[in-house]
Image (cartoon, rainbow, N blue to C red):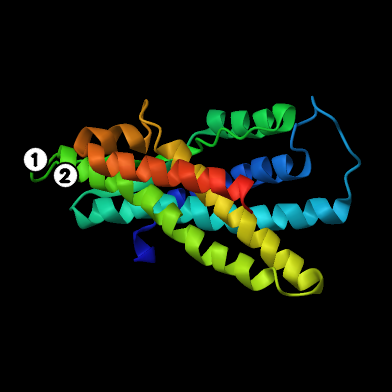
Amino acid sequence: MLERITRREESDLFIAWIAISISFAIIKIAPYGITGPVRSIDPVVALISFGIALLTVGIGFILHEMAHKFTAIKFGYWAEFRKDNTMLLFAVLLAALVGFVFAAPGATVIYSNSASGQGLTRKENGIISASGPVVNLLLCIPFAALVLIGVPLMGASGILLTQIGIFGIQINAMIAAFNMIPISILDGRKVMAWNIPIFALLIIASFGTLVASFYLL
């Protein structure tokens, strides 16, 4: 399976992963950016926040894109992730300035099967698009388990597990919710064009999980 990930794709995934991890680490350290109230930053806390972001964003972002890729391959198409340097820079700057992440690091490009003349059907496009947010919602389950494990524990290990779990839920819910917005090239528009009930289920679950992650955890 991994041999289907090209060297260029590996490079694009790595750069996008680092950039959006930095963005999420920034809002963890400075929730309002440099334009809001600025508190003193503990280097150790900043390093831990970046490490947590690397782990949670890496899992959520990479598995989201790989879900698109391998679902497309299952339907007989070739697909590769391509980063968008402009949007990656914009994400980091926006996080630093106002404490908000607009995570559109690129997209998984699906190539039609020109040899057979096969093109994406609306159903195939909808299923491929839905696979990413579905993976993110499923990933919220193991991260929620980390919260349940971490809360009763005493000391630094319990706090760390809880923080990873909470941030993991928030990151994955955020990725799912953002991508389910039915505009432009986002997944939500293609899922809605294919099946409105499934679109409604996914967008409600995504935004519901996102709201719950901030207000209940």
How many angstroms separate mark 1 from mark 2 (CA)? 6 Å
Place of residue 38 in the rendered image (x, y in percent of width and height, measured from the top left): 86, 33
Any mark on residue 113, and which? 2
Q: In the image, residue 96 lies at what x, y percent?
A: 73, 32
Decide if residue 98 is in sight here: yes
Left-right relation of 167 to 81: right
Compared to residue 189, the image places residue 57 above or below, namely: below
Residue farthest to the right? Answer: 40
The quadrant in which residue 137 appears is bottom left
Q: Where is 153 relative to 112, above or below?
A: below
Q: Give the camera-side residue of 171 and 185.
A: 171
Task: List the residue tagged with mark 1.
Answer: 117
Residue 25 image offset from top left, x and y in percent? 70, 46
Q: Are marks 1 and 2 in contact (CB under 8 Å)?
A: yes
- Between 175 and 114, the residue placed more toward the observer is 175
Q: Relative to the observer, which residue lies in front, 196 or 91?
A: 196
Q: SS of the residue at dot 1?
A: loop
**Which residue is farthest front?**
216
Three-letter code for the amino acid on which mark 2 is drawn: Asn
- Mark 1 is surrounded, within 10 Å at the Cα level, by few (under 14), some (14 to 19) or many (20 or more) other residues, namely few
